[in-house]
Amino acid sequence: MQTVSFDNGDELPVIGLGTWKSAPGEVYDAVKHALDTGYRHLDCAPIYGNEAEVGRGLSASIETGVVDREDVWVTSKLWNDAHRPEHVRPALESTLEDLQLETLDLYLMHWPVALTRGTDMPESPDDFVPLDDVPLSETWAAMEELVDEGLARHIGVSNFNVPKLRRLMDAADYAPEMNQVEMHPYLPQRDLLAFAEEHDVPLTAYSPLGSKDRPEGMKADDEPLLLEDPTINEIAERHDATPGQVLISWALHRDTVVIPKSVTPAHIDENLAAADLSLTDEDMEAIAELDRGRRYVRGEVWTIDGSPYTQEGVWEK
């Protein structure tokens, strides 16, 4: 398995098991099957509501000798209600308890958005905290302390664009070591990819298959379905592969990490096998024509009436 290398010698496998939308009661078996199949990278977050079950699956696989802890890369994220510096460490400690771990491999700031303590999803303007009151740089400084204390080996961000990355890097002692963003052929994020390559900030692609199974409230009428795209399907047929494998391979050909989600054993296996699919230059050129600027995860919940956040502010270019 190809990996991303870090300055301290750590290696991150480029295909991970995503767990967003994996329902409790399903993710335990999915984690165990993935580790049996050969996955060595799990992507988690407390807001997904299933970290304790992910932890049980990982622990069971360690206890039965399927994997050693040091061979599995585990990523989690700081939720938006824990941006105040005094809340950062308790949030990670809660995640470590759920995952049954002593140290996290990678801890990400989930969104450049702050919420009041105890808020999962905002329902009114009172649930938001403006970034003027809790700057991202202060949250980041508290995350840096987690590295110093050995609770997280690496730290990074999620859903950050180039301007936000620049501002954070200017204020940081430790540069972000990962940026996890939505990325697929309908949203290739070329400017962000170029910035990442120039400044050595690896990218992880979430929703790489188009997130067809995300909540109905996040979907638009008649939205394009990435897995049904004719170009993707033509390339898949030519390579005797699935459309999902083509999309994962595309991400790998761009030197990004990719975290497809599935709880179906056959799909979990297929996704990992995408590492063996070699796309041609012609394939990549054809896929490059699919850019629609189509964002499936728009973060509209952060920009409800009365919120201090706007779509333009969240996704500034």
Image (cartoon, grey):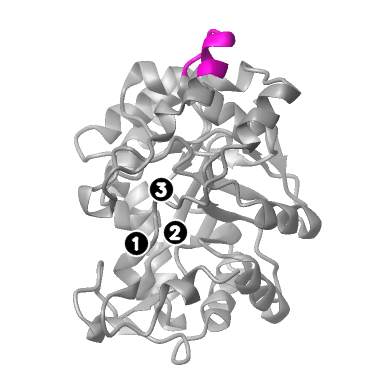
- Which is nearer the eye, 183 or 292? 292
Query: For residue 204, which numbered disc appears in the image?
Result: none
Examine the image and state in which quarter residue 302 appears: bottom left
Which residue was labeled with disc 2? Answer: 77
What range of the chain is rendered magenta? 234-242
What is the three-letter code of the residue carrying label 3?
A: Cys
Instruction: Identify whether 90 is placed above or below 76.
Output: below
The location of residue 251, given as percent across then percent down, is 61, 35
Eyeballing the image, is 140 above or below 306?
A: above
Residue type pointed to by label 2: Lys
For label 3, the SS is loop
The secondary structure type at the circle numbered 2 is strand
Q: Which residue is mark 1?
A: 94
- Which of labels 1 and 2 is toward the front? 2
- Total number of numbered labels? 3
* Three-letter residue code for mark 1: Ser
The residue at the point 62 percent across, 37 percent down is 289
Label 1 – label 2 distance at C-alpha: 11 Å
Q: Residues within 10 Å of mark 2 (few under 14, many from 20)?
A: many
Badge 2 vs badge 3, beta-carbon distance below 8 Å: yes
Dot 3 corresponds to which residue?
A: 44
Residue 311 position within the rendered picture, expressed as x and y whole percent measured from the top left: 42, 71
Left or right relative to 35: residue 14: right
